[in-house]
Image (spheres, rainbow, N blue to C red):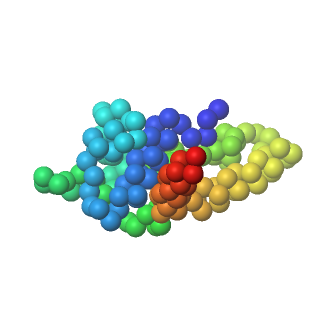
């Protein structure tokens, strides 16, 4: 079971790309798709979903494309995950209170609920700004390491 599905992974990478280039202005879907190894047609569909959800905005013109509609630090990855694939759930019983007749006295569901709360808190605490910064920092470290060797 994957918590983050393939399309969601693509969307997250594309959003980090837009966050990394936030100050530069709009990026074309094609360039983001190429940079992040996302099939172009799928990238277009994902950008449309992200636009409809209000995370990105489309800019027309020769230098057009997409840009984040909020600052990178204002967008957390849980929001993006839920936009692309729906709620993240450790177990089906946590999605719907009436989905299991044993929910009220199940010894497992209370522990899973705690895990779910930790997972949601963790994912909502990660924003695009810090992911973009981490990516830049990692690239700098790799360059320095190559120069030393």
Residue at the (38%, 66%) spot, across then down: 70
Q: Is residue 70 above or below residue 2?
A: below
> Which residue sits at x=66%, y=39%?
92
Q: Is residue 14 above or below residue 26?
A: above
Evaluate whether residue 137 shows in this view: yes
Say left or right for 118 vs 123: right
Give the percent coordinates (x, y) of residue 93. Answer: 70, 42
| Number of numbered callouts drawn | 0
Quadrant including the N terminus = top right
Residue 98 seen anywhere in this rendered image of the structure: no
**Place of residue 131 in the rendered image (x, y in percent of width and height, measured from the top left):** 51, 57
Q: Nearer the viewer, residue 84 or 99?
A: 84
Residue at 46% x, 37% y is 7
Q: Nearer the viewer, residue 133 or 91?
A: 133
Residue 123 in which image quadrant: bottom right
Task: Estimate the x, y position of residue 8 in percent, counting from the top left.
Answer: 48, 41
> Along the horizontal axis of the image, is 65 left or right of 77?
left
* In this picture, residue 36 sits left or right of residue 148: left
Placement of 46 over or under 66, stated as above or below: above
Which of these two is toward me, 23 or 10? Answer: 23
In percent of width and height, residue 130 lies at: 52, 62
Residue at position x 64%, y 44% in the image? 89
The image quadrant of residue 126 is: bottom right
């Amino acid at each position: 079971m994957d918590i983050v599905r393939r399309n969601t992974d693509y969307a997250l990478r594309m959003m980090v790309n837009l966050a990394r280039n936030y100050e530069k202005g709009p990026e074309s879907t094609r360039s983001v798709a190429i940079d992040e190894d996302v099939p172009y047609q799928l990238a277009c569909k994902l950008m449309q979903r992200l636009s409809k959800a209000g995370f990105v905005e489309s800019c027309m013109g020769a230098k057009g494309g997409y840009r984040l509609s909020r600052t990178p630090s204002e967008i957390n990855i849980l929001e993006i995950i839920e936009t692309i694939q729906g709620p993240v759930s450790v177990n089906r019983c946590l999605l719907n209170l009436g989905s299991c007749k044993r929910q009220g006295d199940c010894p497992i569901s209370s522990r899973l609920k705690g895990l779910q709360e930790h997972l949601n808190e963790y994912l909502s605490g990660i924003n695009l700004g810090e992911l973009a910064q981490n990516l830049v920092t990692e690239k700098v470290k790799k360059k320095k390491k190559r120069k030393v060797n």
